Image (tube, rainbow, N blue to C red):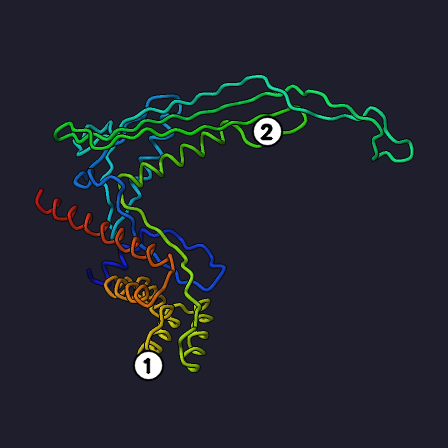
């Protein structure tokens, strides 16, 4: 794949979290969780059944409208009431339930205070305080149907439960409305990741082990580690220089793999990660890096297949 395509694909990636240690930022794309919808381009989201169904369906419609890959819209989202034919229709339902029951909690109260110290209790008793237990549930079912043949390409039940005990002597930490809003937002994100690719950004810690390097190379390696805080590309250039001058160690090979992955030279990254393993590295980030590369490659393969399908229509 061309370097430009990798850069464009990275537009899907979310913002990086500030690093707390010497790290390199890795961005990439995860494929859709359900590749069975890869050939569906135009899509309509009907209002979901249930009192809160319109809230979820509107949020989902907006989310799918905003999906981009390589700078292009991933879906053509059509209003269901427009009557325009589409490749797929998303339907579903949202059910919110709230159940309250009585309960008690133990409390203590002072029966006799120390006359000499108001903060000291000489005699106290335990009693039951009447409270309320609230259980809220959100149950969502979603289904995506291919309009060409009527086949159900995607279906998923989603549910969440929130339990809270509130008493007269303390305020409730959250409301039902807040729980429902947060849950629906999370469910929209889950559906979106199931049917479309999504970006990611991770700060991966570099390997700081200088063991096995000659003294000058070890000092340059250490300086490159510090450099990651302000100039990641410069740090990678420094490690590349070291790798040309001395036999790479497991730590140097891992960092070179991380650098290659960061610039999306995935073939080189796989080679360097493999060399790090052969040199004895037990760094679990190697396996995670290989998994990231595999996911990104699958996302691009899905995109290529999608573009080929569009050209044939």
Q: Is residue 260 left or right of residue 84?
A: right
Q: Is residue 133 left or right of residue 77?
A: right
Q: Against 121, is 7 above or below?
A: below
Crowdedness near tag 1: few (<14), some (14–19) or many (≥20) residues, C-alpha within 10 Å? few
In the picture, the quarter occupied by the N terminus is bottom left
Asked whether 311 or 165 is in front, the reply is 165
Question: Of tags 1 and 2, which is closer to the observer?
Answer: 1
Image mark for residue 33: none
Q: Where is residue 271 shown, x and y percent of the image?
A: 25, 65
Q: Which picture quadrant has residue 11?
A: bottom left
Q: Where is residue 308 shown, x and y percent of the image?
A: 12, 48
Instruction: Kindly identify the residue that appears in the image at 40 percent across and 59 percent down.
Output: 204
In the picture, the quarter occupied by the C terminus is top left
Q: Which picture quadrant has residue 263?
A: bottom left
Asked whether 110 or 137 is in front, the reply is 110
Q: CA distance from mark 1 to mark 2?
A: 64 Å
Residue lying farthest to the right in this orientation: 116
Instruction: Kindly identify the residue that appears in the image at 43 percent across and 73 percent down.
Output: 210
Q: Is residue 109 left or right of residue 79?
A: right
Q: Where is residue 200 shown, x and y percent of the image?
A: 35, 51
Q: Is residue 302 left or right of residue 118?
A: left
Crowdedness near tag 2: few (<14), some (14–19) or many (≥20) residues, C-alpha within 10 Å? few
Task: Give the structural element (helix, strand or loop) at label 2.
Answer: loop
Instruction: Kindly identify the residue that appears in the image at 29 percent across and 29 percent down.
Output: 142
Image mark for residue 172: 2
- For the residues bearing labels 1 and 2, Cβ distance under 8 angstroms: no
**Residue for badge 1:** 245
Q: Against 300, is 236 above or below?
A: below
Asked whether 269 or 65 is in front, the reply is 269
Instruction: Kindly identify the residue that appears in the image at 40 percent across and 36 percent down.
Output: 186
Q: Where is residue 291 shown, x and y percent of the image?
A: 30, 53
Q: Against 25, is 99 above or below?
A: above
């Amino acid at each position: 794949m061309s370097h430009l395509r990798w850069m464009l694909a990275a537009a899907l990636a979310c913002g990086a979290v500030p690093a707390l240690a010497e790290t390199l930022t890795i961005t990439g794309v995860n494929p859709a969780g359900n590749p069975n919808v890869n050939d569906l381009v135009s899509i309509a989201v009907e209002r979901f059944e249930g009192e809160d169904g319109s809230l979820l369906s509107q949020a989902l419609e907006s989310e799918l409208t905003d999906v981009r890959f390589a700078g292009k819209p991933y879906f053509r989202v059509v209003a269901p009431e427009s009557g325009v034919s589409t490749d797929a229709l998303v339907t579903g339902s949202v059910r919110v339930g709230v159940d309250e029951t009585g309960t008690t909690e133990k409390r203590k109260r002072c029966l006799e205070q120390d006359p000499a110290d108001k903060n000291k209790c000489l005699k106290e008793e335990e009693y039951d305080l009447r409270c309320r237990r609230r259980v809220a549930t959100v149950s969502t079912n979603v289904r995506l149907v291919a309009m060409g043949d009527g086949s159900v390409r995607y279906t998923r039940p989603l549910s969440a439960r929130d339990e809270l005990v509130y008493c007269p002597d303390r305020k409730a930490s959250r409301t039902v409305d807040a729980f429902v809003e947060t849950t629906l937002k999370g469910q929209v994100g889950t559906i979106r990741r199931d049917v479309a690719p999504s970006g990611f950004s991770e700060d991966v810690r570099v390997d700081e082990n200088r063991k096995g390097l000659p003294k000058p190379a070890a000092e340059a390696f250490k300086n490159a580690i510090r450099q990651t805080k302000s100039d990641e590309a410069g740090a990678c250039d420094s490690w590349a220089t070291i790798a040309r001058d001395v036999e790479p160690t497991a730590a140097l090979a891992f960092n070179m793999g991380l650098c290659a992955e960061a610039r999306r030279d995935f073939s080189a990254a796989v080679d360097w990660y493999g060399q790090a393993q052969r040199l004895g590295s037990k760094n679990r980030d190697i396996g995670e890096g290989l998994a990231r590369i595999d996911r990104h490659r699958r996302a691009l393969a899905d995109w290529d297949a999608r573009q080929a399908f569009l050209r044939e229509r």
